Image (cartoon, rainbow, N blue to C red):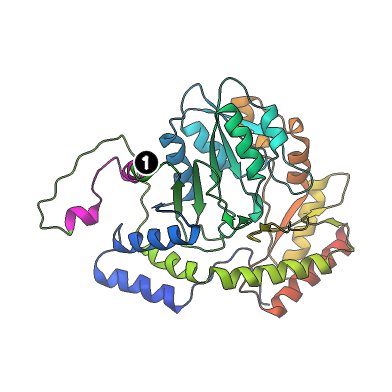
Amino acid sequence: MNFITFGAPYYSQEEIADVVESMQSGWIGTGQKVKRFEKVFAQYLGVEDCVAVNSCTSALHLSLLEAGIGAGDEVITTAMTFCSTVNVIIHAGATPVLADISSDDWNLTPESIEEKITKKTKAILVVHFAGRACDMPRIRLIADKYKLIIIEDCAHAIETKIADKHVGTFGDFAAFSFYSTKNISAGEGGVVVTNRGSEALDRIRQRALHGMDKDAFKRFSSDGKAEYDVGFVGHKYNMMDLNAAIVFHQLRKVNDWHKRRQEIWSYYLQEFSNLQLSLPSLVKAEETHAYHLFQILLKVNNDPSTARSAFRQRMYESGVGSGIHYKPIAGFSVYKRKFSWETMSWPNAQHFGQHTISIPLSPHLSDLDVEKVVASVKDASRNVL
């Protein structure tokens, strides 16, 4: 049986050949292929420059550090996100403050943000969830009103736009992801973007490599006399040429893959419209959705955990994988211990996190694969719900 793995990456001969060329060249660390990718990704977003790093998590952490966020500060973020969003705030020394999501589009809302602002609030960490843009014009107004920094988590949102403006260019900083399940993948990787100019990017680049002012390529590809200084107590967050070789070619295909994702998304909406499921809300006319995740919410009132487990097991037995994005962040034990959070404090996020299932949405699914996913969801709906 051909099992459809949720979120499996796809690499063509172009990516493979470029990686092999890097390995044969003797240079696999941070070098010219990282620079090449930074240039084309900045062009794609319509910004002057960016810094490629080893993960979106690193990109978020570096953004917080460059923003000067630390002990005594509060950062507002969404109650429905991956743990890395909260972890980086803690690593920076600040306190995460959770705001609830919309029951319609499952994104952080401007109203929920404003309710959480205190004298200690220094930043808003926005997550463009599943590829749908948050209401950035209104969030920008709130940030300006209270003199707050905006950091955009664009891990799900490489292709996402509001009108013709890419997300990641509305805030002060932004972080993108090239993890293996993302719309373009390097296995691991990320990018930092900022509107604070080249000096800020230079500091971010330096922080990403131990605080050193010269990377290995500059030190070892010169005449052997290159000296360096350590200006920050930095981190080991740099991207390798191996990863950059992969994602450079992935980016060249992103528009074609986006069209295929949209086709599958629209077909799912059509085929699932009469099932006992809540489906993603329609995409707004002024929005370009990245179609990163297609999520269904099970319409069950009692014991959603048992129903979801049975639903996913039924799909698995029919040869289709699935995911959960995400469980309520407040419900994890480490945060409950640290902050005394209770999921019921964020009712929309709690409901979503208990009922959601993500189904395969890869642009590399064949029409037969898509039909198999549809049949699997319909079968599970009939036999579990």
Looking at the figure, which quarter contains the N terminus?
bottom right
Determine the main secondary structure of the stretch shown in magenta. helix
Looking at this view, is 79 or 137 the one in front? 137
Looking at this view, is 13 or 118 the one in front? 118
How far from the left and from the top, in percent, is residue 114?
68, 30
How far from the left and from the top, in percent, is residue 348?
77, 40
Instruction: Tell me the quarter of the picture where residue 322 sits.
Output: bottom right
- Tell whether 276 sits left or right of 53: right
Looking at this view, is 134 or 75 the one in front? 134
Residue 243 at least partly seen: no
Residue span colored magenta: 200-220
Instruction: Tell me the quarter of the picture where residue 204 sits.
Output: top left
- Tell whether 71 sits left or right of 238: right
Looking at the figure, which quarter contains the C terminus?
bottom right
Residue 210 on the magenta span: yes
Name the residue located 87 percent from the left edge and 49 percent from the top edge. 300
Against 108, residue 27 (above or below) is: below
Name the residue located 75 percent from the left edge and 68 percent from the top edge. 266
Name the residue located 60 percent from the left edge and 57 percent from the top edge. 160
How far from the left and from the top, in percent, is residue 227?
14, 46
Q: Which residue is mark 1?
A: 200
Tell me the crowding category of disc 1: few under 14, some 14 to 19, or many 20 or more residues within 10 angstroms, Cα based. Answer: some
How far from the left and from the top, in percent, is residue 6?
64, 64
Name the residue located 72 percent from the left edge and 80 percent from the top edge. 368
Give the residue type that dot 1 points to. Ala
Residue 256 at least partly seen: yes
